[in-house]
């Protein structure tokens, strides 16, 4: 499953392009989710990036909600029932469980990968392993240098 995402990201270092493709890939490949996307760290605030799902909270301070807490601790947080998580920020009232994985680029916390589900206790250990691997693959791709022919690839992909 990860080989498909790896081939999608290989050779593209742009974090927005990679986040957009990663969010879309997750949304299509993971069953029983209703939101998948990125928040990027800007100072002391997470700012929404590319995602799939309902419109989301735009800014989340570090230490607030599941995303802000995961970023502040720099550790994955799995929440079986978001209504029991103190300080949960409800962007989509249909969400019942959540997993948030922080990621680093060039050795610095860059943001979090956030996935929500309308099911209670949706995310188990295999999901955690997969989503942490996805976040690491995303960060690795963004830390890679741009290929020398990046400009020519874009022009080749344009319709005539």
Image (cartoon, grey):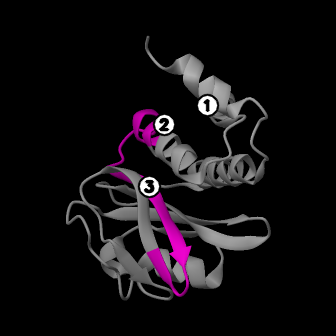
Q: Position of residue 156 (x, y in %)?
A: 58, 17
User: CB atoms at circles 2 and 1 under 8 Å apart?
Assistant: yes
The boundaries of the magenta stretch are 24-46
Task: Name the disc covering residue 37, or none.
Answer: 3
Q: Is residue 70 above or below residue 62?
A: above
Q: Is residue 109 above or below residue 155?
A: below
Real-space Cα distance between discs 2 and 3? 10 Å
Q: Secondary structure at mark 2?
A: helix
Q: Residue at x 65, y 49 (%)?
A: 138
- The numbered mark, 2 or 3, whose residue comes first in the sequence reads 2
User: CB atoms at circles 1 and 3 under 8 Å apart?
Assistant: no
Q: Position of residue 89 (x, y in %)?
A: 31, 78
Q: Nearer the viewer, residue 37 or 70?
A: 37
Q: Residue at x 68, y 33 (%)?
A: 150
Q: Is residue 98 above or below residue 27?
A: below
Real-space Cα distance between discs 1 and 3? 16 Å
Which residue position holds label 2?
Answer: 25
């Amino acid at each position: 499953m990860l080989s498909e995402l790896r081939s999608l990201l290989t050779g593209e270092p742009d974090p927005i392009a990679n986040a957009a493709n990663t969010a879309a890939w997750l949304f299509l490949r993971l069953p029983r989710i209703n939101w998948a996307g990125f928040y990027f760290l800007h100072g002391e605030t997470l700012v929404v990036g590319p995602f799939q799902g309902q419109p989301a909270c735009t800014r989340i301070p570090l230490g607030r909600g599941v995303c802000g807490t995961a970023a502040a601790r720099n550790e994955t947080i799995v929440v079986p029932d978001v209504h029991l998580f103190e300080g949960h920020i409800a962007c989509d009232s249909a969400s019942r469980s959540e997993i948030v994985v922080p990621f680093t680029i060039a050795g610095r916390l860059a943001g979090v990968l956030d996935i929500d589900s309308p099911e209670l206790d949706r995310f188990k250990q295999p999901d955690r392993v997969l989503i942490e691997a996805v976040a690491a693959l995303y960060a690795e791709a963004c830390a890679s240098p741009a290929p020398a022919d990046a400009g020519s690839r874009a022009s080749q992909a344009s319709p005539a």
